[in-house]
Image (cartoon, rainbow, N blue to C red):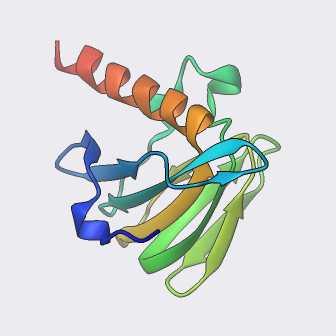
């Protein structure tokens, strides 16, 4: 299976952050996976959009690759990491993302049910903020 990242349907759209999600991208041990392409401008923090999820953090594990820029990841224990272009990454459940001085573009592979739950939550939070 293959897919051009530019053709992945948009799930989250804003002037400063976008996530495209292709569901049903394969299974592993009976668990469905998706692929997502994300971009975030410099100075974006998604933490507020995760409020209301367990521990107010993303509880979905992700495996992926940073295509361009850099992203900061903060974990539930308070530790932080910076992931930069060219790096393969794993983000376990219990994390949030933010950028500082530069934007980021990444591709992630995630368990579909958990990831859809988080993205649906983010979309709802964004919609509530617009009202």
Q: In percent of the image, x 71 and y 63: which residue is there?
A: 90
Q: Position of residue 116 (x, y in %)?
A: 49, 33
Does residue 6 appear to the left or right of 117 in the view shown? left
> Image check: 88 left or right of 123?
right
Task: Confirm whether residue 102 shows in the render.
Answer: yes
The structure residue drawn at horizontal position 79% and vertical position 49%, both measured from the top left corner, is 29
Work out which residue is located at the far bottom of the displayed protein and give it: 86
Up-down relation of residue 91 to residue 129 (above or below): below
Q: Quadrant of the C terminus?
A: top left
Look at the picture and state if 125 lies above or below 28: above
**Residue that protrudes farthest toward the right in the picture:** 77
Q: In this rendering, does residue 48 appear at all?
A: no
Seen from the viewer's position, the closer of residues 52 and 37 is 37
Q: Quadrant of residue 76?
A: top right
In-front residue for pair 38/40: 38
Location of residue 65 by image quarter: bottom right
Q: Is residue 93 above or below residue 71?
A: above
* Left or right of residue 120: residue 88: right
- The residue depicted at 44 percent of the width and 45 percent of the height is 23
67 above or below 25? Answer: below
Count of numbered badges drawn on the protein: 0
Q: Measured from the top left, where is residue 54 in percent x and y?
A: 68, 22
């Amino acid at each position: 299976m293959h897919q051009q990242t530019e053709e992945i349907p948009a799930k989250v759209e804003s002037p400063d952050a976008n996530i495209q999600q292709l569901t049903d991208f394969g299974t592993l041990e009976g668990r469905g996976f998706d692929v997502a392409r994300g971009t975030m401008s410099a100075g974006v923090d998604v933490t507020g959009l995760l409020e209301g999820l367990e521990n107010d953090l993303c509880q979905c594990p992700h495996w992926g690759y940073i295509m361009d820029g850099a992203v900061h990841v903060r974990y539930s224990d308070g530790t932080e990491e910076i992931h930069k272009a060219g790096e393969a990454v794993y983000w376990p459940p219990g994390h949030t993302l933010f950028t500082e001085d530069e934007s980021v573009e990444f591709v992630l592979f995630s368990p579909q049910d958990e990831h859809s739950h988080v993205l649906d939550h983010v979309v709802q939070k964004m919609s509530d903020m617009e009202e």
